[in-house]
Amino acid sequence: MSRNILRLKRRKRIRAKIIGTGVIPRVAVFRSNKNLYLQAIDDQKGVTLAFASTLKDKDPAGRLAQALLSKRIKKIVFDRGGYLYHGKVKQLAQDLRAAGLEF
């Protein structure tokens, strides 16, 4: 099986177990070859609460954390999107914790 198919299977397994709410949103990570994209999602309403990416931001974790903290959201559920908790995804999680979010 290809690497992407294995990632999609992991993503499906992860998403079956976690859900985001308005109080504790799910922070979903997508990693392309060049950039990282983050979304804070309320799955109950199907709404994106905040968005950040490396396209425009040097520190997307800081910007996302700032947006969530301004909405008085401190706790999140981290959805790594099927990517291994290693490298950029791990650094992103550590940056979110350092910015003041709990998960």
Image: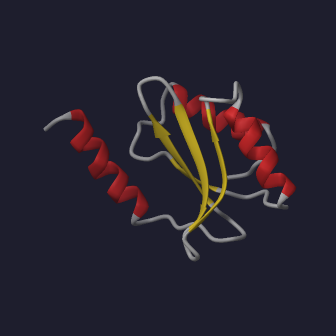
Left or right position of 47 against 85? right
Q: Residue at x 60, y 29 (%)?
A: 55
Residue 13 location (% of width, % of height): 34, 58
In this picture, residue 11 sits left or right of residue 36 = left
28 up-or-down from 34: above or below = below
The coloring applied to the image is secondary structure
Looking at the rendering, in which quadrant would you find the N terminus?
top left
Hey, which quadrant is residue 6 in on the image? top left
Residue 80 placement (x, y as % from top left): 49, 45
Along the horizontal axis of the image, is 48 left or right of 79?
right
Q: Could you tell me which residue is drawn at 47 percent across and 23 percent down?
A: 34
Is residue 86 placed above or below 71 in the rendered structure? above
Q: Residue furthest front?
A: 56
Question: Looking at the image, which is closer to me, 1 or 71?
Answer: 71
Residue 99: percent from left, percent from top: 79, 39
Please identify the quarter of the rendering in which residue 2 is found: top left
Could you say which is closer to the camera, residue 81 or residue 41? 41
Q: Residue at 79%, 57% (x, y): give it.
A: 74
Q: Which residue is drawn at the image coordinates 69% and 29% (left, top)?
A: 57
Q: Which quarter of the picture shows residue 65?
A: top right
